[in-house]
């Protein structure tokens, strides 16, 4: 309630209304409205009700601030989940990096190098891109139309991202297998190029994550309204 002046200013700006226009509708001077917003004076009960009527809200919004939209409340939990997962993915990667680099120098322990380079890093970058876009959606509404075309593009992009992880993983497995030496020179070069590109392009997965979030991934299920009881006639 102590921020009533800020609440009045925020509600006025939401209505694209100037202080002069609000003063005219309250039948007061512009200086009175300015005093309200700066906290020098407070409107009485009658003026609070009048402000609520002008702004198309209730007195609680004037006293305690506009209510948080339902869509923003629903977006808080996915945002916190994304931040937590991103922190875990990057934390584990940073902790394991020295050990993995030492293994690479000794040409040992193929599995940790494979997991960190071909799987963990792309997922970490993609999760970071998704989380940053989700965090931005708390302040800027991001509501893509849930059309059939958008759903197909979203699925195609997700499949492309998964293939971008699976293909280098398969190349890593072939390179470190006994089959590698029996492959042709050009095929070995091709596998090496794929692995090299995957090592140098992890940040691309951040854009995959951002694009997936902009396209509404994961799709939220709409809550079905509960049937209301019909009074017996």
Image (cartoon, rainbow, N blue to C red):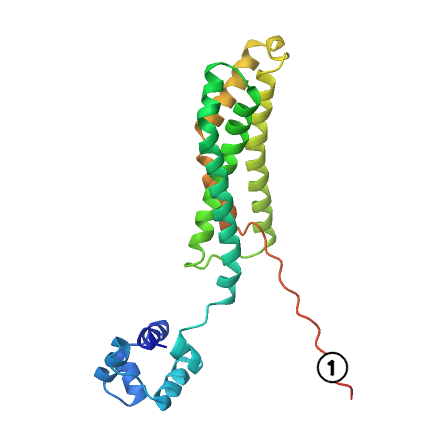
Above or below — where is 141 with respect to 157?
A: below
**97 horizontally vs 153: left or right:** left
Question: Quadrant of the image for the N terminus?
Answer: bottom left
Residue for point 48% across, 33% down: 93
The answer to whether residue 230 shows anywhere in this view is: yes
**SS at mark 1 in the image:** loop
Residue 124, percent from left and from top? 49, 38
Front position in the image: 29 or 84? 84
Residue positioned most to the right: 233
The answer to whether residue 202 shows anywhere in this view is: no
Above or below — where is 67 with respect to 216?
A: below
Residue 145 sits in quarter: bottom right
Residue for point 47% across, 24% down: 99
Residue for point 50% across, 27% down: 117
Residue for point 58% across, 33% down: 163
Above or below — where is 209 with respect to 70?
A: above
Residue 69, percent from left and from top? 48, 67
Residue 18 sits in quarter: bottom left
Front position in the image: 36 or 136? 36
Front position in the image: 210 or 106? 106
The residue under label 1 is: 230
Question: Quadrant of the image for the C terminus?
Answer: bottom right
Mark 1 Cα shell of 10 Å, populated few (<14), some (14-19), many (≥20): few
Residue 217, percent from left and from top? 55, 49
**27 horizontally vs 56: left or right:** left
Residue 45, percent from left and from top? 37, 89
Above or below — where is 3 with respect to 183?
A: below
Q: How many marks?
A: 1
């Amino acid at each position: 309630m102590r921020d009533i002046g800020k609440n009045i200013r925020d509600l006025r700006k939401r209505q694209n209304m100037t202080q002069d226009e609000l003063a005219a509708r309250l039948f007061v001077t512009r200086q009175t409205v300015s005093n309200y917003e700066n906290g020098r004076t407070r409107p009485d009960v009658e003026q609070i009700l009048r402000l609520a009527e002008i702004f198309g809200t209730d007195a609680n919004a004037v006293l305690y601030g506009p209510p948080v939209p339902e869509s923003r409340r629903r977006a808080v939990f996915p945002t916190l989940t994304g931040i937590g997962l991103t922190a875990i993915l990057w934390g584990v990667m940073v902790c394991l990096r020295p050990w993995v680099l030492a293994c690479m120098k000794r040409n040992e322990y193929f599995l940790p190098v494979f997991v960190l380079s071909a799987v963990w890093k792309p997922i970490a970058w993609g999760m970071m891109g998704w989380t940053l876009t989700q965090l931005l959606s708390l302040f800027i509404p991001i509501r893509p139309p849930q059309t059939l075309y958008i759903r197909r593009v979203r699925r195609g992009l997700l499949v492309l991202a998964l293939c971008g992880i699976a293909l280098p993983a398969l190349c890593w497995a072939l390179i470190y297998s006994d089959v590698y030496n029996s492959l042709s020179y050009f095929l070995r070069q091709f596998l090496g190029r794929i692995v090299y590109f995957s090592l140098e392009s992890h940040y691309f997965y951040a854009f995959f994550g951002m694009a997936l979030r902009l396209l509404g991934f994961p799709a939220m299920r709409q809550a079905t309204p509960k049937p209301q009881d019909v009074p017996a006639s």
